[in-house]
Image (cartoon, coloured by chain):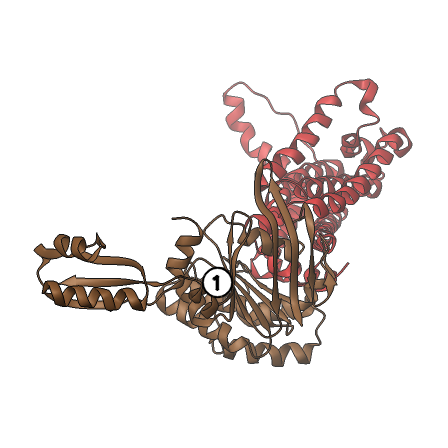
Chain colours: A red, B brown
Amino acid sequence: MNGFSPFLKKEFFELWRRGRLILFGVLFVFFGIEAPAIAKLTPYLFKMMSEDMEQQGLVIKEVTSNAASSYEQFFSNLLMILIVFIIVYAGSVTNEFSKGSAIPLLTKGLSRSALILSKLVCALLTWSAGLWLCFGITYGYTAFYWKDSSVTSVLPAVLLWWLFSVMVICVMFFFASFAKTHIQVMIGTGGIVFIMSMASIAELVKKYLPISITNSMDICTGKTSVTDILPAIIIACVITVLSAVFSVLLIRKRKI
Amino acid sequence: MNVLEVKDLHKSFGSKTVLDGLTFSVSEGSIFGFIGRNGAGKTTTMKIILGLLQADSGEITVCGEKVRYGSTPTNKYIGYLPDVPEFYGYMTAKEYLRLCGEITGMKQSEIKSRSGELLELVGLGGEKHRIKGYSRGMKQRLGIAQALINKPRLLICDEPTSALDPVGRKEILDIIHAARSETSVVFSTHILSDVERICDDTAILEKGKIALSGTVSELKAKRSGSDLHIVPANADETAKAAQILGGTVQDGIVVIKNASEETMFKVLETISREKLHISRIEHAEADLEQLFMEVIGK
């Protein structure tokens, strides 16, 4: 894999120079703080609005929040950040070929495998660091504000969400290895997630679908155990590995 | 020794045959002009030499090593300048050359000294701005610098002057000419004056194969004769003069095609005998453009 290390360095340099590292940093920190903040502020907001609502005939009883409310907000935020991440990264590979910036480097000995794998590694490291930073902030605030036992196993839930996001990022690189434009990459990646969520309506196949591992609150509260969704976890791992392998194989065949 | 040898290369895109038994070679230390009209297959040939495109059949060797499709090891001998080079706009020229040097496996100290040397050569030595603000000519010059970073034995330039203004063209030609001291050059173009200016050997690509090849002077000599241009003193007499001298009228002047020295003497004799008033008569020097037009049948 010729040129992996210099190209990986270039990828991080690009993230920094184009301001994307700051963008992601701000997003992850903001949503890390936002989740417990929303959970903490919700009862106050309802209290403030209750008088107005009473005049309209709506009676609001006491609204309380707990650690589960904070994590519920955290997991729904993760999906939003992942969508932003996919939109930003969708053109990473396709632009190299459509604009032709990869050509001088490929003719200098950079292997195609090194090109796509260094981009994948950069994306996974950035995403993983951001996700765990986001979780760390939410965890810290949640532990500080709520000492209740509404959430029993948050770490496995976050780990599984992380696995799902890694799978989605690998699927995105699979599409990027042969797609011509970033729009095709987004449609392909979004399409796979959409099909999974549509299929998960059917109870029969639900436990096999990787999207099931993002039912994080059920896992957090102990409603679903990890063993219940073991087939989905295995399938998510298989899709992740296959996507990465095929992205390398397909980019080698890509016409320039 | 030949630094590049292309033998019986075939390539088709669907039903369209682009290369049909292309054969040529480039000797070490020369500047080779690869001439052909737009769509003749020049870029396709270069991409196959670089292993970016797969040939249907044929063989290419660079410095004696066979080219393979994909990541070909022969690229270590080659520096490539694409027709419209695209770089990372957020980098400076120095940062980009460092990336190129690192990818080719050069040492940091070597990269530093070579980058400085090359940026001076291409006139970007004092340039501190990022590449996104560069003009087309500046990008082309940086393109040559990146192509030369690892001291390649063969520099391949794909129409490096086509999109440039006359000043930019001259600069690029001067740089390529200066680079010949350390590398052989393959230079594709459809601008024939550029070829006449810097190339030693040339080949005209037509219908997927080499229609004509040799040194620039050899190619010129292959024309049977050059045209004779006669401008009558009185424009009204042009048609009459053409009839008497056995020529044709083109753009208000009398043209006698492929005129030898002997024809020239006969024409002068006729002018004198018929007392034709002539303001100018010249034996136009054969140029590549005429030859190119003849080869492509226009």
Q: Quadrant of residue B15?
A: top right
Residue at image x 71%, y 41%? A174
Residue at 68% x, 44% y is A177
Q: Of B228 and A38, which appears nearest the observer? A: B228
For the point 71% across and 76% down, the residue is B107
Whole-percent x, y for residue A162 in the image:
77, 43
Question: Looking at the image, can residue A253 be seen?
Answer: yes
Element type where label 1 sits in the image: loop
In the figure, is residue B135 to the left or right of B78?
Answer: left
B181 over A218 or under it: above or below: below
Residue placed most toward the observer, B34 or B219:
B219
Q: Is residue B87 above or below residue A179?
A: below
The amino acid sitting under disc 1 is Pro
Between A133 and B39, the one lying in front of the other is B39
User: Where is mark 1, residue-wise?
Assistant: B160
Q: Nearer the viewer, residue B151 or B203?
A: B203
Binning the other alpha carbons within 10 Å of mark 1 as few (below 14), some (14 to 19) or many (20 upward) gives: many
- Chain where mark 1 sits: B
